[in-house]
Image (cartoon, helix red, strand yellow):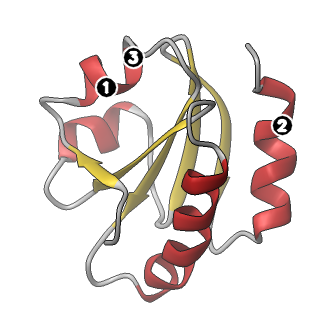
Amino acid sequence: MGNIAEIDDETFEIEVLQADLPVLVDFGAEWCHPCKQLDPIIEELAQEWTGKVKVFKLDVDSNVNTTMTYGVMGVPSLILFIKGEPVERMTGLVPKRRILEAVAPHLGS
């Protein structure tokens, strides 16, 4: 999984909902091939966004409560949270450009 920290049902509130920076959560699963294809893009973005956006991974199979709370039905799913609220959602193997376009308006929020 590289350098991106993993969160779970127990750490989600403190790491995501109470964060002062925007947070992008990558909802995925070990068995998900598109999730593995998305990993290098997420790693790259996490490096580019150091100090601007926090990026975390969450395994949907191990963290059913959070997955259900946010209505994640397919993986990979990316949800951007600002001040604890989900503001952008992308599902599937989305290109880097699409992720940048979704997050850019929220930088500096």
Query: Percent position (x, y) of residue 6?
Result: 26, 51
**SS at badge 1:** helix
User: Of residues 30 and 46, which is closer to you in this image?
Assistant: 46
Residues at marks 1 and 3, CA–CA distance in whole angstroms: 6 Å
Q: How many neighbours does mark 2 have within 10 angstroms: few (below 14), some (14-19), or many (20 or more)?
A: few
Residue 91 shown left or right of residue 96 in the figure: left
- N-terminal-most mark, 2 or 3: 3
Vertical relation: 66 (above or below) 46: above
Residue 50 shown left or right of residue 96 in the figure: left
Query: Percent position (x, y) of residue 88?
Result: 69, 36
Vertical relation: 13 (above or below) 64: above
Q: Amino acid at mark 1?
A: Glu
Q: Quadrant of the C terminus?
A: top right
- N-terminal-most mark, 2 or 1: 1
- The residue that label 2 is drawn on is 104
Determine the image quadrant of residue 3: bottom left
Q: Amino acid at mark 3?
A: Leu
- The residue that label 3 is drawn on is 17
**SS at badge 3:** helix
Q: Quadrant of the N terminus?
A: bottom left
User: Of residues 43 and 25, which is closer to you in this image?
Assistant: 43
Which residue: 62% across, 71% down? 41
Q: How many neighbours does mark 3 have within 10 angstroms: few (below 14), some (14-19), or many (20 or more)?
A: some
Query: Percent position (x, y) of residue 9?
Result: 17, 35
- Residue 15's disc is 1
